Image (cartoon, grey):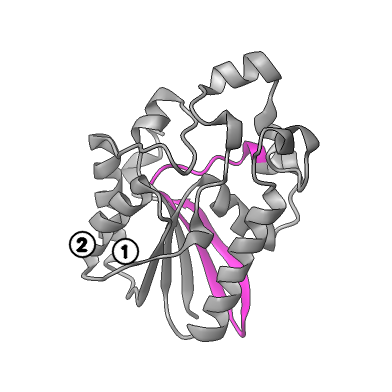
Amino acid sequence: MPLVIFMRHGQADNNVNRMLVGRHLESHLTEFGRQQVADAAKQLKNVPIDRVVVSPVIRAMETADIVCNAIGADYKVDERLYEIELGKLVGMNYEEVVTKYGNLFLKFYDEHDPVLESFGVEPFLQVKKRVRSLLDEIAENHADRNVLCVTHLDPIKAAIATLLDLKPEALYKWHIRNASMTILKQESKEYSLSGVNVMAMHRYPLE
């Protein structure tokens, strides 16, 4: 059965600084993040990847560059894999947001939240719709191929949420590690979840 593998970008400067940079502020991979991605790429060499699609955001594209160089593939940019639009929260620190506004991050996983929408944050329902569109396209046009999607935390949670009926609290607590892989299996245009936070074994005790 073919696989659709969602890979989160490697650790970037914004992850270290706990800064919300969203789609448009540049944040590059750290050296540690590059090593995370290199480790993941070694695992991907065991799987024939026929197609790679990537978010247009620089940290995702840097991740895809490392992976594609390792596995001998090219990638295409797909805006459906974009980071969630963070609106007026861009540039703020996580702790600053919580201090000023309470835990808005839990609200991210409500399908619509008027407070978040007042900040210009993309509704999670919209993230799910664009990720679902990509999954439907892969099932229709690449049913016999393994596809790698390099993206961000919330589009990966959206992929999980299309398969599992998880409450917002559960999605909030489910942390997706940098450069980890979430693996979906496809059979007869239907998907099942085969793995979350798949990464090199030496990382689990440390992260």
Q: Residues within 10 Å of mark 2 (few under 14, many from 20)?
A: some
| 189 up-or-down from 88: above or below | below
Residue highlighted by disc 2 = 70
Q: How many callouts does the rendering have?
A: 2
Q: Position of residue 206 (x, y in %)?
A: 37, 32
Residue 101 falls left or right of residue 38 = right
Asked which secondary structure carries label 1, the reply is helix
Q: Residues within 10 Å of mark 1 (few under 14, many from 20)?
A: some
Q: Nearer the N terminus, badge 1 or badge 2?
A: 1
Q: Residue at x 35, y 45 (%)?
A: 59
Q: Which mark is residue 201?
A: none
| 46 up-or-down from 115: above or below | below
Q: Are the residues at dot 1 and dot 2 in contact (C-beta closer than 8 Å)? A: yes
> What segment carries the magenta color?
172-198
Which of the two residues, 106 or 192, is positioned nearer the viewer here?
106
Which of the two residues, 141 or 33, is positioned nearer the viewer here?
141
Q: Residue at x 29, y 50 (%)?
A: 62
The amino acid marked with disc number 2 is Ala
Q: CA distance from mark 1 to mark 2?
A: 9 Å
Residue highlighted by disc 1 = 44
Q: Residue at x 40, y 23 (%)?
A: 17
| 117 up-or-down from 182: above or below | above
Magenta-colored stretch includes residue 173: yes
